[in-house]
Image (cartoon, rainbow, N blue to C red):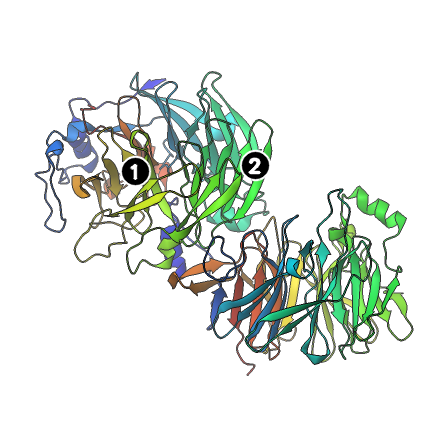
Amino acid sequence: MKSIRTNLGLGIIGRRNHHLGGNRVRIFGLILFSLSCLPVQSTSAQESITDKNMRFIDYYGFPGGSSAWNSIGYNPKDNTVYVGITDHRNKVALYIYDASKDSVHLKGFISELANLRPFQWQAKIHTKFVATSNGDMYFATDGGESREEYLMDHPKGYAGGFIMKWSPSEGRITNLGMGLEYESFKDIDIDTATGKIYTITYPQVHFLVYDPKTNEMKDYGRLGSGHVPRMMFTDRWSNCYYVDWRQRLVKYEKNSGKLVFAENSLPAFPGTPGEHIITGITAFANDERNGVIYFITYGAKVIAFYPQQTGIGNVVDLGGVIDVPGKEKWNYYVPNLNVGNNGKLYYVIGGHGIYAKKDQSLFVEFDPKSKTIKVLFEYPSTVFVEATGCNTKDKDGNLYFAGKRNVPRSERNKSNLAELGDNPTVPFLVKFNPDKKVQ
Amino acid sequence: MKILFAALLQACVIQLSAQYTFFEPKEAFAIEVSLEHSLLKRLPIYRNSISSLVVSGDHIIGGTTADEGLTPFIFTASLSKRELVSFLDINETIPGQRSIRTGFSRGKNNGLYAGTIANKNEKGENQDGHLIEVKLDAAGASAIKDLGAPVPGEGIFSLTADSPGTLLYGITYPTGIFFTYNIATKTVKTFKDIVPSTQDLQTLSEYVLNPEDYLCKALIEGLQGQIFGSLPINKLFYFDPASQRFHIFEDHLPEVWGRRTLGQVESWAKSKDGKLYGGNAGDGQLFEINPVNKKVKNLGKPIMMPRLRGLAFGRDGKLYGIAGSLPGYAHLFSYNPNKEGFSDYGNPQFTMKAPGIEQGIDWRGFQLGTIASSPDGKYIVMGEDESLSHLLVFAVDANK
């Protein structure tokens, strides 16, 4: 066990200055912040949010770890947050953040915990972590694109991804086996009542349902093509949702055991390219108290979805994630979303070369009732370049994202960062609470 | 450009140094054939794996395979409109069928002939497969005529017609009985010469192989009217209609050492000069048969995976084919015996436009089950083998 570096007293500004070596950092805590290019609006509830509501938590013990992509999840059983950190090559570390004790624990590396041989290498966990009612956590592994996708049965190729279970009580991983040969997993979800696992494969976009109790796996076939939508989610009845190539919701209806397709595509801005349509949903957050699931599409739409037990529920278009004058409304990258106890949405815009403002990440609050958007914080990429992670909230209403930052050129030769390659990033856990201070 | 964009889309990658490009012919497109729960004219899920294809004029005619217990379709798509124009549920003509996997054979009077495999009954017993005749009207609407079941209790696994279009030759499933069908007189003759022997079946069972793995998947007529195919284990035969006799080749199918039990012809194409090109499913070799001395020449493997699911000549004189299959991905390849030999184009990825997706989306064909060329060789058409399958089409450059 190792305690986190709390940075208490430094705050994020102090930490940022440390990393940037004097670069000027612009942080706007209160919504005094206004960008001439951003239509920022204000609400009264926002007055108390400062950088004290935000905290970046470092990992330890894995200098080569560079990022996470949605490999984060919350375990309500013991108020912990799970994160898989990858080196994008063949090592994936499992971290557990104990929210009650405010400490980070490196549990080990997936290949060792799951007894994988070198030819079963896994480059990352790409799925979220999902919890069963008894506190076990499920996730699945991924190969990391080109080497996975094209070498295949070559000796250096990819054997396929694995579904795994972490048992907190036993402190060990159970490897539940592969899905489809040579295919990895991009996301996973669970029927908490039955324990059945829903998952989607890469690159052939097959929707699978796996029952760990019986080891039965059913392939419901391919639902997409040119790019695999990265997100699936469940409703209160444990029906599972995904999208097809037209960005129509596809529901696995557990009572019938069949796929149900929405007749219409999700809302999209005019001019949204097909490449963005086919990529589907990038983030979701479930507001269970209000019976609504919010999600964000790769076309930058914020959508409220009201699921129903049978059939597809209502979809309400809440508008765009932000609107920067002169920029296409569909062209923002938001692979993360959380909903606060205040009912508002929080997400980070930017990453993978797509930014609302050049090389800046924007931390945004979206009020679904008023449809108002506020930029709470703005970060240079050397402080916060991208966040992933959805629907991760602890019992105290703290919201979590898997964040990372670019390493400035001046720092790239430092010995502890040497393993990060030519374009290094450093991962960290983001903890945010709109209603109270977290540092 | 597509690669650059694809790199941006790889939302989980720090850096994607893609060392591949997609095949981009000047004219290429995908046609959306299947879509569950839609007001558009589309085939429903799990009943649309495109297992037979032929091109006639502006029309692509397809036959599908359904999941067990479901029934397949005959459909027509327009090359010029780039859309599905009609389809027929086979169940409305012949109840209980599951698959049309024989391809289409051209008969006299513009008839297209195919065979079906039925769903099993409640006891798990095989049921009758039927021969069907398909005719199109000018708008592409099809009509199906049931020609009956040539062999009771058997489905039809492979089929071809003679050049005059008066006789059909087929192999049944699961037994592997060779049969002829006279279209005019509706008479059937059956032959058990190529039915796997008891000893062969014992060997095949040691490798846990099923009839799908060893029965001949495709037949073709040679220039002298002989019908060519394969039989276990790893053998080639031809049937001489004149003598009504079968001849087993001295040469066997090309093999990878230790894997000859997998030998199985699953595709054929005939060049203008009468050479026969075959695809071996077992290890994915392309081979050539000398029509005179019946010698077999191994032309090699276009990719490292097994399967060679289809072959079709383009107007540029190249032989186009589909290599590979699950658990890998299909690759489009060409073979030019005089120049570059094999060229591997990988998974074809073409733009699919349709109402609601007018901007176009990139459609990547992971699993391709069939390939056909238009009679003039301009268009190569590929059909997907998926739960929701589509067509991928490209135009071949004119031969210069």
Estimate the x, y position of residue B284 in percent, counting from the top left: 68, 58
Badge 2 marks a residue whose secondary structure is strand
Q: Relative to residue A181, is residue A69 drawn left or right?
A: left
User: Neighbour class for label 2 at 10 Å: few (<14), some, many (≥20)?
Assistant: some
Can you give x and y, in whole percent of width and height, for residue A45 in the image? 13, 32
Determine which residue is flagged by label 1.
A337
Quarter of the picture holding the C terminus of chain A = top left
Q: Is residue B148 above or below residue B139?
A: above
On the question of residue A115 being in view, the answer is no
Judging depth in this view, the residue of B252 and A75 nearest the camera is A75
Q: Secondary structure at mark 1?
A: strand
The chain carrying label 1 is A
Q: Are marks 1 and 2 on the same chain?
A: yes
Between discs 1 and 2, the one toward the N terminus: 2
Type of the residue with mark 2? Met
Label 1 close to label 2 by CB (< 8 Å): no
- In x, y percent, where is residue A30? 11, 35
Q: Is residue A410 left or right of residue A74?
A: left
Q: Would residue A62 be found to the left or right of residue B340 on screen?
A: left
- Look at 26% across and 25% down and name the residue there: A397
Question: Quick check: B316 above or below B51?
Answer: below
Q: Give the farthest residue toward the left.
A: A32
Q: The residue under label 1 is which amino acid type?
A: Leu
The location of residue A355, given as percent across then percent down, is 24, 49
Looking at the image, which residue is at 73% across and 79% down?
Answer: B108
Q: Which residue is mark 2?
A: A178
